[in-house]
Amino acid sequence: MLTEPRQFSIKKDASKELRNKAIIPNLLLVLSCVIGWIAVVLYASNGDYKPETLWTSSAIIFIGLSISQYRNIMRQIEAIENFTITIETNSIYRDIANFPTVQLYHSEIVAIERSKNSDLVLRSNDKENTIYIPNQMENFEELKMLLSQIRPIEESTKKNNLVLKAILSSVCMIVLTAAVFLVSDTLLLSITWILLLAYVIYYISSTKKSKHIDNTTKNNSWILVLVLALATIKVLYSWL
């Protein structure tokens, strides 16, 4: 039985393993975005395009996104190195550098699940108040023992769709942005702009309230606003 707060930190050598695990999902994300860009260009041009222009622009997007995702991985790794779980007599805290703190009262935990790779997930009725605990924690067995005193640890039957959601979100942004600037048909352009507007509003609102997205990413949301502003100018110009 816990009588005083107990804090658990990530292992010192965990950053390399986490970085290697992040490479393939991020590479898939970049490739998916490039494929989305090529598809929009081919559709919008009706076959009237210069191959060298298409491949040059695709290469620029690939390099730009690769650099962006690499910087994102390194930022996430730097943050995860300061990952801690603190268990108190009535609460659990997840602290990560540059992330909002997640607090769960023991009474709020509706399930503790163990994934196929032995990571733990502490779920509540509020999706934002979910705590993900990687298996690279120091004294992981002791951590599991303390958590099992709160609720039994169950084998997870849910699939982790975070990577798929990230890929779909990025492809959606690339495709809609490319379509707005490449499509010439006024009606299709207007529909695409409306979809882009809805996407930007949804992305910014969900990002701002999320406790699982770092503050730097949240602060960079102004880039989407800039893209939307430029797209709006293009749409208004097409209507004149």
Image: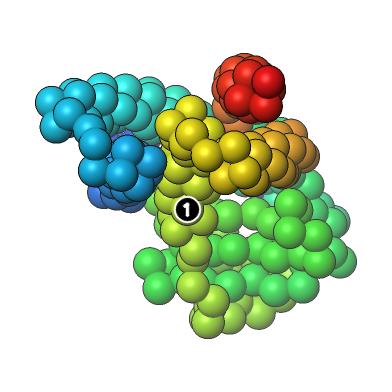
Position of 69 compared to 175: left or right? left
Picture coordinates of residue 116, whole percent (x, y): 40, 73
Against 225, is 54 above or below?
A: below
Amino acid type, residue under disc 1 in the picture: Leu
Position of 28 compared to 167: left or right? left
Position of 195 compared to 185: left or right? right
- Would you name the residue on which mark 1 appears? 168
Q: Residues within 10 Å of mark 1 (few under 14, many from 20)?
A: some
- Tag count in the figure? 1
Q: Between 102 and 212, which is closer to the camera in this rendering?
A: 212
At 43% from the left and 32% from the top, the residue drawn is 182
Picture coordinates of residue 147, whole percent (x, y): 65, 66
At 13% from the left and 26% from the top, the residue drawn is 52
At 77% from the left and 64% from the top, the residue drawn is 124
Q: Between 233 and 13, which is closer to the camera in this rendering?
A: 233
- Looking at the rendered structure, the secondary structure element under dot 1 is helix
The quadrant in which residue 29 appears is top left
